[in-house]
Image (tube, rainbow, N blue to C red):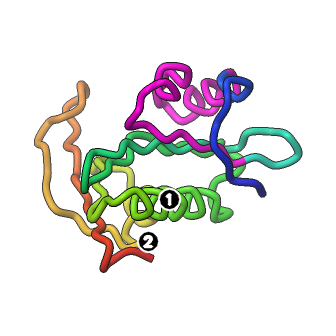
Amino acid sequence: MILRGATADDDLAILGVAKQCGLTIDPALERGLPQARLFVATSADEVLGFALLWLLGDEAEVIDLGVLPFSQGQGLGKQLLILLLKCATENGARCVFLEVRAGNIRARTLYERVGFQECGRRVRYYSDGEDALLYRSCVKDAV
């Protein structure tokens, strides 16, 4: 498994992963933003997952993290998340935030295993009425 920064050559594969995960991303736009860091996880030249982080001063936010369904449950999401935490810390962030659907137990379990703690709730945040849970990991809590 190789974790690396995304390039323009990865854009179509990232879009494919995002679609299968129910996510929306514009990889070309994100790569052009000064605050954005976009990473991919590859195996045998195939993109299996991606992760997007925004650096916002002494804070950072995980914008998206997606892994192809057939690659889930193998630790790839955890590796990507740890990479984002490392990137955030190396760029001066003291806390990293993210939001997740309240019903996404698999993702919530991953975030909690890596050291994120629930810190808030946005009631009926998503268009289907589901709540969003807010999570935070601070440098002293990080893996």
Look at mark 2 in the image and give the residue it sits on: 114
Q: Under tag 1, what secondary structure?
A: helix
Disc sitting over residue 50 in the figure: none
User: In the rendered image, which quarter is residue 118 located in?
Assistant: bottom left
Relative to 26, say whether 116 is above or below: below
Q: Nearer the viewer, residue 107 or 25?
A: 25
* Classed neighbour count for the residue bearing mark 2: other residues with Cα under 10 Å, few (<14), some (14–19), many (≥20): some
Q: Residue 3 location, x and y as percent?
A: 68, 53
* Classed neighbour count for the residue bearing mark 1: other residues with Cα under 10 Å, few (<14), some (14–19), many (≥20): many
Task: For the residues labelled 1 and 2, say whether their Cβ atoms are less than 8 Å apart.
Answer: yes
Q: Under tag 2, what secondary structure?
A: loop
- The amino acid type, in three-letter code, at marker 2 is Val
> Which of the two labelled residues, at mark 1 and mark 2, occupies the earlier sequence position?
1
User: Spatial distance from mark 1 to mark 2, Cα to Cα?
Assistant: 8 Å
Residue at 49 percent of width and 24 percent of height? 32
Look at mark 1 in the image and give the residue it sits on: 81
Residue at 76 percent of width and 46 percent of height? 42
Q: Residue 48 location, x and y as percent?
A: 71, 43
Residue at 26 percent of width and 59 percent of height? 135
Relative to 10, say whether 61 is above or below: below
Looking at the rendering, the stretch of residues picked out in magenta corresponds to 12-41
